[in-house]
Structure formats: C-alpha cells, structure tokens
Amino acid sequence: MSHTAAPVPVFQLMADELAERQASSLYRNRRVIDSPQGARVQLNGREVLNFCSNDYLGLANHPAIVAAAQQGAAEWGVGSGAAHLVTGHFTPQHTLEERLAALSGKPAAILVSTGFMANLAVIPALLGRGDAVFADKLNHASLNDACQLARADFKRFAHNDVAQLERLLSESTSKRKLIAVDAVFSMDGDIAPLAEMLALAEKYDALLYIDDAHGFGVLGDGRGTLAELGIDSPRIIYMATLGKGAGVAGAYIAAEQVVIDYLINTARAYIYTTAAPPLLACALHASLDIIEQDVERRARLQRHIATFRAALADAPCELLPSSTAIQPIIVKDNATALALSQALLDADILVAAIRPPTVPTPRLRVTLSAAHSDADVKLLCREIRRVLAAQG
Ligand SMILES: *Cc1c(COP(=O)(O)O)cnc(C)c1O
C-alpha cells in the first residue's frame, strides 16, 4: 500500500513513517478471515491450515460453547447496559467469578473485558508515584503500558534473570513493591521462574503479579501455570485471559479478598467501563465445563508439541526452548521471516512472521492447538523443512 501526500501536514508525517516501515519489512497488514476460528480457516477464497491462533484447545467455535452463548443471548440479551458497579453485573458473571476464584485456589475474582484492560486496571490501582514495579523485559506490551501508566518506578530485568531481579529488589526503598511477569511468554513460549520469584517476593516483601494469558486452560490441568508449577501464596495476584485457551473473550483477576475489594473500589479501567455482555459469561461457563472435564484435548496438544519439536530438532533452524503451544523459529532478519511465512502460505499454511518491535528478534511464531490433527502437524513440519531448504 502506498500513501500519497495528504492535505493535512501531520498526515504527511504519518505517511512518511509508514513508508519507512514498509522499507524495513515492518509494515503491518490485517488478513480478513472468512470463516470461524479453527485448524482451517478461509483466507482470500481458499482454505488454509492455521498455525497462528491462540485458540490452543480448539474451543473458539465449539458447538456446546456456541449454544451456551446463544442461550445466554436469549436469556440475558446482548448488552450489559452499564458498568459492573452500576447495573451491569449479572448473575452468570457473578457465578463465573466464584467459579474462576475456586479454580485458581483464590478467595475472590473479578471479570474484566480483556486481558489488556485487566493489566491497565490492576497495576495502576496497586501502585503509584514512589512505588516500584519490577518487570521482565519480554513482558507483554499491555503489562509494559500498565507499568508506565502507574507512574511507579519502572525497573526492568533481563528475561528470566532472577539474580538481576534480586539486585533491583534489594536496592529498592519503595514501600510498595510489585513483581510483574508473564507466566508463559507470548512470543518465546517459555515459562517464568515463578517459584524463585515468589521466594524473592517473600524475602523483599513484594507482591507478585502473574499474567497467565497463555497458561490458563492449557497448563496445570487447565488451572494454569501456578497449578502446573505447584505454587501458591497470598502474595500472588493472578490474571488470566479468556480469549485464548478458553476460546471466548475477557479476562479475570483472582487474589485475596482484600485485593479484589481494593480493585473494585479503585481500578479505573474496571470501574469506568461498560461490563462485557453477560452472554459471554454464559459461554465461558460452558468453556470451563470442557476445560475441567476434557483431559484428552490437553493431551492432544501435548502430543503435537512433542511431534513438532522432534520433527524439527535437526532442521536448519533455531527453535527456542519452549515446552508450550507457542513454538518460535528464530530467523536472521525481517525479510527472511516474511519470505518464509509467504512460502508457507503459498502451500496453504498460515504461520505468522513476528518482527520488532513486537519482539527483539524476527521469528516465525507457530502456535499449536488441540484443534489440529496429527496429520496437520506432520504436514506443517514437512513444509517448514522444505521452505527452509529452499531459502538456503
Ligand atoms: C494476549 C495477551 C494479553 C491481552 O489479553 P487480551 O484478552 O487479548 O486483551 C495480555 N497479556 C499477555 C501475555 C497476552 O499474551
């Protein structure tokens, strides 16, 4: 796409910046998908095998969840009509919160419309000027923005570097301290050393905020990364999103009752927004039924991860040490990432090229799902090997 001179001068600045992005293979386009989310999707009139959704359990178009959403619309309408603190907090949402709290082993939970909003709601509510937040450099963009918005001292440590985290904590004189990390890193797929971080939180009297966007529903028998690692503490404030593994939309925060009450009273991105439609809570109840009961779905995903890693172990590419559904392949530059992604697309396989500033180093980001068949994953591996060989 080319942008021509615009009548408003500032538009020309925008057009120039976009042209620069294009020149360095950083220009972003959206794809229009013409079918529901799934292992296969319709793209530009053809069916492609999809390895870039976060629908890890294949629940985004699950018939029982779709039916629950339809039933929810019939019973509760489509709009919530108000914020949670006014008249927008409905029975299915309240019971879902109780269920999510129990699932997370916490006394209380609140629902938020998206994970991005959950981070923007929590961090600035818990911290202000004079406080300190300690954050992994590879944290999700929404956590970084939330830390900026809090106006607290923003201390970043190298990815998973617990020693540096301890140094920063020991130097801090702030009264309120919060360690904030992704549990599963969205672009690398690895798991944060949360047990060590919890020990540091205890030693330095900090809280530990965990963003489990990619662990909930998938790890720890569906309960997420804390359950997977077997750790728990009142110091942990747990956030998980409900639009990835859970297949619907939204997020929740689970914590001690006092923390949840504090958020309900002070978290601006929670207080001043219209609640999500209650029908989504109905859909999420159905999703939790499946997450709690359908063990086979998680087993299938684990099998796909093992197949993928074994099949590409000796391929001429760098796999990151990830045991999760997120399997990045590091490539040498942006143009290579785009070329490989395009070559796969020519074979009707959709794999996203992820480039800076989303990540420090360009890569293909493969995400596996229980929606895929064994044959789908084998085909993916064969085609990746073929396009890598062709690329040289
Ligand atoms: C996707 C994601 C979010 C944002 O959640 P949404 O519900 O999509 O807004 C937050 N944190 C991490 C780590 C994510 O991957």
Image (cartoon, helix red, strand yellow):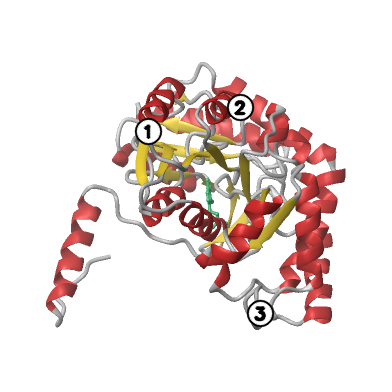
Mark 1–mark 3 distance (CA, rounded to whole Å) = 39 Å
Q: Return the x and y of residue 311 as percentages of the image width and height.
A: 59, 22
Kindly indicate whether the residue at mark 3 contacts the one at mark 2 (C-beta within 8 angstroms): no
* Mark carried by residue 86: 3
Res. 274 in view: yes
Which amino acid type is marked by label 3? Val
Q: Locate residue 160, reporting x and y percent.
A: 46, 27
Frontmost of labels 1 and 2 is: 1
Label 1 close to label 3 by CB (< 8 Å): no
Decide: few, some or many residues near mark 1? Use Cα within 10 Å; few <14, some 14-19, many ≥20.
Answer: some
> What kind of element bears circle 1?
loop
Q: Earlier in the sequence, mark 1 or mark 3?
A: 3
Name the residue carrying label 1. 172
- Circle nearer the viewer, 1 or 3: 1
Q: Can residue 249 be seen in this snapshot?
A: no
The residue to which callout 2 is attached is: 323
Which is more toward the observer, 35 or 305? Answer: 305
Answer with the quarter of the image where residue 336 lies.
top left
Secondary structure beneath dot 3 equals loop
Quadrant for the N terminus, please: bottom left
Query: Relative to residue 351, is residue 300 drawn left or right?
Result: right
Q: Is residue 390 left or right of residue 263?
A: left
Give x and y (percent) for residue 180: 49, 41
Label 1, label 2: how many angstroms apart (C-alpha)? Answer: 34 Å
The earlier-in-sequence mark between 1 and 2 is 1
Disc 2: residue Cβ within 8 A of ligand 1's nearest atom: no
Q: Amino acid at mark 1?
A: Ser
- Quarter occupied by the C terminus: top left
Q: Looking at the image, which residue is at 36% across and 36% down?
A: 156
What residue is at 69 percent from the left and 29 percent from the top?
231
Query: Does residue 352 lie above or below 194 as drawn?
Result: below
